[in-house]
Image (cartoon, rainbow, N blue to C red):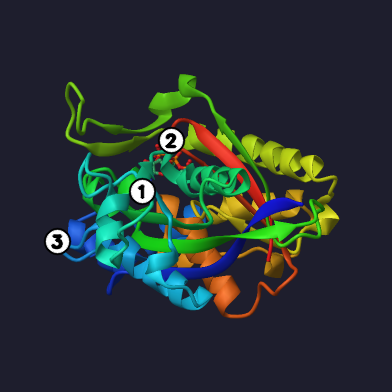
Amino acid sequence: MVLRARIAGCGAYLPAQRLSNDELAALHGLDTSDAWIRERTGIGFRHMAAPGETASEMGAAAAREALAHAGAQASEVDAILVATSTPDSAFPATAVRIQAQLGVTRGFAFDMAAACTGFVYALGVADSLIRSGAARCVLVIGTEVFSRILDWTDRGTCVLFGDGAGAVLLRAEPGAGTTADRGILSCHLHADGRHGDILHIEGGAGSTGGAGLLRMAGKEVFRHAVTKLAAVVDEALAANGMTHADINWLVPHQANARIIEAMGRKLNLPRERVVMTVERHANTSAASIPLALCEARRDGRIADGDLVVMEAIGGGLTWGAAIARF
Ligand code: UT7
C-alpha cells in the first residue's frame, strides 16, 4: 500500500478588472497592437488586481473555493504551500497570511519561489509530504500580482502577464502503487541557475539594487521552453511506463499559445485535449496551471479516471512536469 495525494478539489480567483489588448495599450500609452499580441502570444485579455488587492487575498479566495469543491473544512488542512513570485511581503510568507484568512490554526505554511514553475514545484513537495505521512490534507496555491512588477515602458514584457490565483486541495488516500491509482503519480523538477538572468526580477527584498521589475529575454526563454518541456514530459511518461497515447489532457503553463500548440503537436494530442486559457488570462505565472486545471475540472472536461499531464517553465531557469489521475 502506498499513500497517494488525490486532487480532491480545486478553486480559482480572477480579479474583477479585465482589460483587452487595446484597453491595456490605451491605458499605458503602449506602441503595440491587438494583432501583434494575438499573433505572437495568443493573448487577448488579462485580469488586473485592484489597488490594495494582495496575492494572499486572491490565494485565500481560490483556496476557499477548493475547500468547498472538495467538501472539506479549513480545520482539516495541515499544510499550505504557496507558489508565488509576488508575495505580500518577503516575510511572513503569503502562505501564513492565507492560513490566517482561512482561519486555519494548525499545521504549517510556507512559500515557494520557482516563478512560473512554482505550482509544479509545490505539487511535487506536497506529494512528498503526503507520501511520507508528514501531512494528510494540503492546500497548494499559485497566486500572482504580476501587474505590480511589470515595467509599463517595456512593451516586450508588459503585455504578456495577468493577475490571478488557483488552488487545489490534496488529500492522502491509500493506493495500490499502480498507475491506475487516483492522485499524483509523479513529479519531475529541474533547475539550471546558469540561465538565471534570462527571466528575472531586477531588485526586490535583499537585493543590492534595481526597481523590482521583471526582465525577460523572450526569444531565449522560448528556445529553452520548446526543448525542455518536451523532454520533461517524456521523462514523466517514461517514469510511469506510459506513452503519449495514455494522456487524456495536457494542462500546460499558459505563457504563449505557440509554445502550447507546439507541445500538443509533439504529444500527438488533438487541440481539444489541450486546456488553453492564455487568450483570456494571459500569463499568470504560478497561478496559470491551477486556473486552467480548475476550469477544465469544474466544467466537466476532466473526468474521474482521466490522466492529466501538467508542465511549466519559468525563471530560474526552472521547469518541471507532473502526472496525475483524477
Ligand atoms: O512564463 C515564463 C515563460 N515565458 C515564456 O515562455 C515566454 C517565451 N517567449 C515568448 O513568448 C516570445 O519570445 C515573446 C512573445 C515574448 C516575444 O515574441 P518574439 O517573436 O520572440 O518577438 P521579439 O521579442 O523577437 O520581437 C520581435 C519584434 C521586435 O521588433 P524588431 O526588432 O523586429 O523591429 C520587437 O521590438 O516585435 C517587437 N515587439 C513588439 N511589437 C509590438 C516586441 N513587443 C512588442 C509589442 N508590440 N508588444
Indicate the position of residue 63 as horizontal and vertical percent values.
Answer: 39, 66
Q: Measuring from the top left, give residue 122's x and y in whole percent.
A: 49, 46
Which is nearer the N-term, disc 2 or disc 1? 1
Calculate the distance from the C-alpha at mark 2 to the C-alpha at mark 1. Answer: 23 Å
As measured in the structure, the alpha-carbon distance from the residue carrying label 3 to the one carrying label 2 is: 26 Å
- Label 2 beta carbon within 8 A of ligand 1: yes
Of the pair 319 and 70, the residue shown nearer to us: 70
Q: Give the amino acid at mark 1.
A: Ala
Query: Which is in the foreground here, disc 1 or disc 3?
Result: 1
In the foreground, 99 or 235: 99
Residue at 57% over, 61% down: 171
Where does label 1 land, which residue? 109
Location of mark 2 (residue): 315
For marks 1 and 3, the one nearer the N-term is 3
Q: Earlier in the sequence, mark 3 or mark 2?
A: 3
Numbered badge on residue 287 = none
Q: Are marks 3 and 2 in contact (CB under 8 Å)?
A: no
Residue at (14, 61) in percent of width and height: 52
Q: In the image, what residue type sits under mark 3? A: Gly
Residue at position x 48%, y 54% in the image: 41
Q: Classify 6 as above or below 243.
A: below
Q: Is residue 318 above or below residue 138?
A: above
Left or right of 150 on screen, residue 197: right
Place residue 164 in its image quadrant: bottom left
